[in-house]
Image (tube, grey):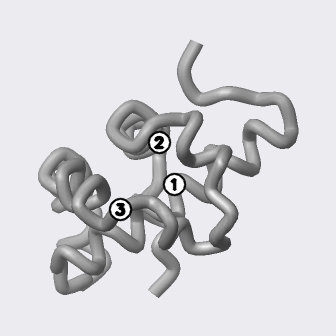
């Protein structure tokens, strides 16, 4: 499953605010496993509310691990955007 298809500006903002831009940029792990799993869990309900119709349309089975994979994909995009000098939030 390509989790990036569920990452949009809203998901990016939820992850940036919920996890924190600083911690995302400081992460040394390619999969952000050095950020406590409980923090990813805490933002999962907000991500779920936003992507549930897209997931249903894609035939995806939504689970906590599915949501966290989307969140981590968003974190990768945030980190990539920061390297390129573009930002999600003003």
Q: Quadrant of residue 62?
A: bottom left
Mark closest to the chain's N terminus, 2 or 1: 2
Label 2, label 1: how far apart the Cα atoms are: 5 Å
- In the rendered image, residue 11, in percent from the top left (x then y), is placed at 39, 45
**Which residue corresponds to mark 2?**
12
How many numbered marks, from 0 up? 3
Judged from the image, the secondary structure of the residue bearing numbered disc 2 is helix
Whether residue 53 is situated above or below residue 3 in the rendered picture: above
Whether residue 71 is situated above or below residue 89 in the rendered picture: below
Judged from the image, the secondary structure of the residue bearing numbered disc 1 is helix
Q: Quadrant of the N terminus?
A: bottom left
Whether residue 41 is situated above or below residue 23 in the rendered picture: below
Residue 60 falls left or right of residue 31: left
Residue in view at x 57 percent, y 73 percent:
31
**Which residue corresponds to mark 1?**
74
Q: Are marks 2 and 1 in contact (CB under 8 Å)?
A: yes
Residue 64 falls left or right of residue 84: left
**Which residue corresponds to mark 3?**
36
């Amino acid at each position: 499953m390509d989790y990036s298809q569920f990452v949009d500006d809203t998901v990016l903002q939820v992850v940036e605010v919920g996890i924190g831009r600083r911690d995302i940029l400081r992460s040394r792990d390619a999969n952000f496993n050095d950020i406590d799993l409980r923090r990813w869990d805490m933002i999962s309900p907000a991500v779920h509310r936003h992507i549930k119709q897209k997931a249903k349309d894609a035939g995806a089975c939504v689970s906590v691990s599915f949501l966290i994979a989307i969140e981590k994909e968003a974190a990768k995009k945030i980190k990539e955007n920061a390297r390129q000098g573009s930002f999600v939030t003003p």
